[in-house]
Amino acid sequence: MSTFHGNNLPALMRDPGLVADGQVSILTADESHRLAAATTGRFPALNCQEIDWGRAPFRSQRFYHDHERDWPGVASEILSEHAGRTAILWGGGSIPDVVAETALVIQHAEDIVNAQPAFWLHPWEATRSSKSSSTAR
């Protein structure tokens, strides 16, 4: 799998070393569709990029971008109980979905927040189990 280029992509996706050694996996369209079906697809949609939280029967956490927030701290708090890997699902389809080491997601939190207005973080291991919590920004 190759890396993608562009200023709107977070650095963790532009680093060929992180992709080559498997710390970041850029998902194919088919993998992204399966991931969405197992995660965000389980929530009622408001539109193509938003979940209708008022009708969501699942426990979730939602955070809004606020330039004064410490996003690496917020990401660390959200993901602290999820060691391993985290899936990043980008709303709108302009950035490919990825799975990355959770520590890298926390380290690159500011880049991730600035890359796209809508994204969802989901513990990668939870996509293989029956857990049904997700974190959206």
Image: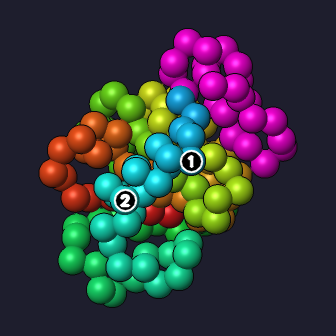
Q: Please, is residue 128 above or below residue 115 in the view?
A: above
> In the picture provided, is 117 more to the left or to the right than 69?
right
Quadrant housing the N terminus: top right
- Amino acid tagged 1: Ala
Distance Cα–Cα, label 1 vs label 2 = 12 Å
Q: Please, is residue 13 above or below residue 21 in the view?
A: below
In x, y percent, where is residue 26?
Answer: 58, 34
Q: Is residue 68 visible?
A: no
Q: Please, is residue 15 above or below residue 130 in the view?
A: above
- Amino acid tagged 2: Ala
The residue that appears at 69% across and 26% down in the rendered structure is 2
The quadrant in which residue 109 appears is top right
Q: Which residue is disc 2 drawn over?
A: 37
Q: Which residue is disc 1 drawn over?
A: 29
Helix, strand or loop under label 2: helix
Is 8 within the magenta?
yes
Most extreme residue toward the left is 130
Q: Earlier in the sequence, mark 1 or mark 2?
A: 1
The residue that appears at 18% across and 52% down in the rendered structure is 131
The quadrant in which residue 36 appears is bottom left
User: Which contiguous range is marked in magenta?
Assistant: 1-24
The residue that appears at 71% across and 56% down in the rendered structure is 94
Local crowd at mark 1 within 10 Å, few (<14), some, or many (≥20)?
few
> In the picture provided, is 40 more to the left or to the right than 110?
left
> In the picture provided, is 99 more to the left or to the right than 133?
right
- Residue 60 vs residue 27, the one in the foreground: 27
Helix, strand or loop under label 1: helix
In x, y percent, where is residue 43?
Answer: 33, 72
As drawn, the label of residue 49 is none
